[in-house]
Image (cartoon, rainbow, N blue to C red):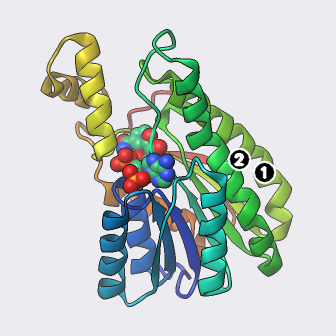
Amino acid sequence: MELGLTGRVAIVAGASKGLGRSIAIGLAREGANVAICARSQDSLTSTAKFIQETYSVAALPIVADLRNHADIDRVVDGTVNRFNRIDILLNNAGGPAPKTFEESTGEDWEKAIGLNFFSGVRLIQRVLPHMKSRSWGRIVNILSSGVKQPIDGLVQSNAARAAMAGAAKTLAREVAVHGILVNNICPGRIQTERVNEVDAATARRKGVTVEEVRRESCREIPMGRYGQPEEFANAVVFLASECASYITGSTLQIDGGFIRSLW
Ligand SMILES: NC(=O)c1ccc[n+]([C@@H]2O[C@H](COP(=O)([O-])OP(=O)(O)OC[C@H]3O[C@@H](n4cnc5c(N)ncnc54)[C@H](OP(=O)(O)O)[C@@H]3O)[C@@H](O)[C@H]2O)c1
């Protein structure tokens, strides 16, 4: 299938490792130029180098803390200065502290909403004019299976993702007329550093080993294993492509069958 991504320009947020990195690589593999951002200069630079050398597209690394609106502005302005367009936005970042409601402090909540809601809102606000000017755009928000089935011990994530899902659904209806499609993708358990942290926190809370937590998680997943970042990225790349031309306002889980609900 020709995805029609050659020459497109994507901003991939949180792309120094994990899901964001795999998505940036997946888009580059299909011929898109990418601007990638995260806080760690070294891993961002090495990711950009790997992409450029492997796929012969341009990869622009921009060090940025997504909790800081001035940094978000730098990401968007830097991308436009370099490529003169923005076609695709991958809204992604790290996850909030794995805590229960009673463990979560006011500061935790502010950080979680800042990173997993306001950063996405700000990025979308800034890229929309560029997409509208070309009557084409793809916005994909990386959320969590917690949007459909809240996860114990991840209350801040469950709440912040639900807020983003509500905003995205509303936005999808507002901007469809401009050729801009907005969708959410929810990872279940995909093997990254974030999942290692969450599993370690669950092990501490339950007083069991990390291996026991993993075995228990895998029992809940019909496919019996965690997903790989590339398996997740393939679905994101499709939603970011020309081929997803009649899909908007959807929330798709990539979870090996983990979520039990119908929707
Ligand atoms: N993996 C899963 O199975 C899973 C399941 C459910 C939900 N999710 C969610 O999906 C998202 C991506 O997950 P992941 O597993 O890829 O996480 P990850 O391995 O922790 O990677 C997170 C990425 O975001 C960047 N980042 C974190 N905080 C940032 C900040 N303040 N400003 C800029 N960049 C920031 C990190 O780079 P720096 O540290 O260099 O900034 C890194 O590139 C997270 O929100 C996670 O909670 C993942």
What's the residue type where badge 1 is placed?
Answer: Leu
- Is the C terminus in the top left, top right, bottom left or bottom right quadrant? top right
| 51 horizontally vs 249: left or right | left
Q: What's the residue at 60%, 77% (across, down)?
A: 79
- Rendered position, 163 above or below 79: above
10 Å crowding of disc 2: few (<14), some (14-19), many (20+)? many
Residue 7 relative to residue 246: left or right: left
Front residue of 157/139: it is: 157
Quadrant assignment, res 217: top left
**23, above or below 111, in the image:** below
Return the residue at label 2: 168
Name the disc covering residue 171, or none: 1
Can residue 248 be seen in this snapshot?
A: no
Give residue 81's mark: none
Label 2 CB less than 8 angstroms from ligand 1: no
Q: Position of residue 161 (x, y in %)?
A: 59, 36
Compared with 187, 6 (above or below) is below
Q: Quadrant of residue 42?
A: bottom left
Q: What element does badge 2 sit on?
A: helix
Q: Position of residue 124 (x, y in %)?
A: 70, 58
